[in-house]
Amino acid sequence: MFRNQYDTDITTWSPQGRLYQVEYAMEAVKQGSATVALKSKTHAVVASLKRAPQADLASYQSKSFPISNHCGMAIAGLISDARVLARFMRTECMNHEFMYGTPLSLPALLDKVGDKCQNSTQSSSKRPFGVGALVIGSDEKGVHLYQTCPSGNVYAAKAAAIGARSQSARTYLERHYDTFPSQSFEELIIHALKALSTTCSEGVKLTAQNTSIATVGLRGVQDFVTLSEEDTATWLGRVTIRPEDRVTEGGTEEAPEAEQFPTVTD
């Protein structure tokens, strides 16, 4: 994708009816390191691959954001934009609980997030959020998983994967998603790690340092929590990657040229 006279601001449409600024934001999500999420009837799990630091003294950036006791998210794309969305979601949850005394439901929260993302595509003084999120949580209707998009679209899902090389993870999830509703909490985590491992580039392995796992259960049973490195290492030790788990058919998504989107650092 190359720059042209139609991508200087978000309100300029190309002759083909395209908004290039939105497409650039969606490419930024594809360039971010992979994130995988799935849910059962009682739990939801999100696992993220944290990008390796460029210097030995740099630490991995967190990709998991707690929103409230009953929900949280993991992202792919621009970390700075993710912090803005996380702060907005936390504010909405706190305001609703203060006014009504009950947690904000996930569908209502994601409607607000979709509106905020879509509003950024309507004004020339703004730009789209260059981040995609997988939001997991629970309310009185059960456990939920949602995927957000820079264009303002919000999708409810049984399982989802975003980020670089996420097509291989989606292929793995499509093979097994029929079994997810009946899976136990432990089996969900193992499936998430197996799907995430398919997105690793050659020579990269999942470790306690570059892997983040967050979980949530039914309301009143388990709040949203991000596992510690020690717990993550324990789960990684229980995962055995079989040859048939390494998905190759269908191809994997290649990240766009780095010089086109140099600011993605997650």
Image (cartoon, rainbow, N blue to C red):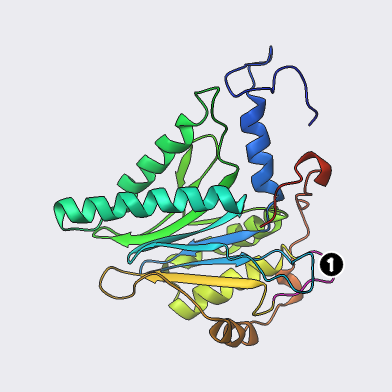
Quick one: quadrant of the C terminus?
Answer: bottom right
Residue 222 in view: yes
Residue 209: percent from the left, percent from the top?
66, 77
Magenta segment, which residues? 201-206
Quick one: quadrant of the N terminus?
Answer: top right
Which residue position holds label 1? 202
Left or right: residue 229 versus residue 140 is: right
Q: Residues within 10 Å of mark 1 (few under 14, many from 20)?
A: few
Residue 194, by quadrant, is bottom right
Q: Nearer the viewer, residue 164 or 122?
A: 122
Left or right: residue 249 versus residue 226 is: right
Q: In this picture, is 235 found above or below 74? A: below
Residue, far top: 15
Residue at x 33% of width, y 75% of height: 222
Residue at x 79% of width, y 39% of height: 260
Residue 259: percent from the left, percent from the top?
83, 43
Secondary element under disc 1, as helix, strand or loop, is loop
Q: In this picture, is 159 found above or below 113? A: below
Residue 25: percent from the left, percent from the top?
63, 38
Residue at x 79% of width, y 73% of height: 56
Q: In this picture, is 182 found above or below 169? A: below
User: Is residue 141 rendered magenta in the image?
Assistant: no
What amino acid is at disc 1? Glu
Residue 33, by quadrant, is bottom right
Left or right: residue 121 versus residue 198 is: left
